[in-house]
Image (cartoon, rainbow, N blue to C red):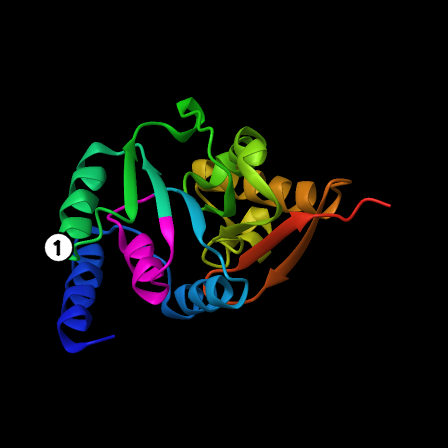
Amino acid sequence: MIGKFHTMVKEIKDYALKENVPIMLDDGIEFLTTFILKHQITKVLEIGTAIGYSSIIMALSSPNLKIVTIERDEARYLEALKNVKKFDLENRITLIFGDALNVNLDDKFDLIFLDGAKGKNIDFLEHFEGNLEKEGFFITDNINFHGYVKKDEREIKSRNLRGLVKKIKKYIEYLKNSNVYSTKFYEIGDGIAVTNKKEVG
């Protein structure tokens, strides 16, 4: 990444830290971009734009990549628009403002990246599975959720956090027990799941 872009990326990361906006950890984003290049991914749907960090890094890493990304928080969506414009990536990153579960798309994607509300991953997967190419992948971030998923639930004092952790565990079990999908789990970043359709026959 040339110097100018490196500085601009650092500015986004600094903003995220200051404003408490969750973005992918460095080794997680490295895994994602390497995966995209290895599998020659050309079309990505991202659920959960935040301020556009992961979309921008994906686009910078793979010049043929087109991304559609959805964000429901207006302030973050507007910040993402500014960031995408700064990098001159408007022709490759399409931003949609709204709740992903209310967005219906006709396009097919090689990769659907789930990085939105963690308690809704099953809903997201089921809502968008018709948009996944036959040989495509779902990638889900934050499968470990800051280590809470591996803790005894009695150690988690906050009721809301306990409820969220239960939903993430339910999603993990959903993936493990699926008759349709095969999933590999990686201890990278905050935990990543890579899911694709099982071969029939």
**In x, y percent, where is residue 19?**
18, 51
Residue 185 image-quadrant placement: bottom right
Image point (68%, 40%), residue name: 174
Indicate the quadrant containing the N terminus: top left, top right, bottom left or bottom right.
Answer: bottom left
The answer to whether residue 115 is visible is: no
Count of all numbered marks drawn on residues in the image? 1
Q: Secondary structure at mark 1?
A: helix
Residue bounds of the magenta highlight: 49-66
Q: Is residue 200 magenta?
A: no
Q: Is residue 62 magenta?
A: yes
Which residue lies under the disc numbered 1?
86
Q: Residue at x 23, y 51 (%)?
A: 20
**116 lies left or right of 149:** left
- 98 relative to 57, above or below: above
Residue 80, image x, y percentages: 21, 46
- Please, is residue 194 above or below residue 134 in the view? below
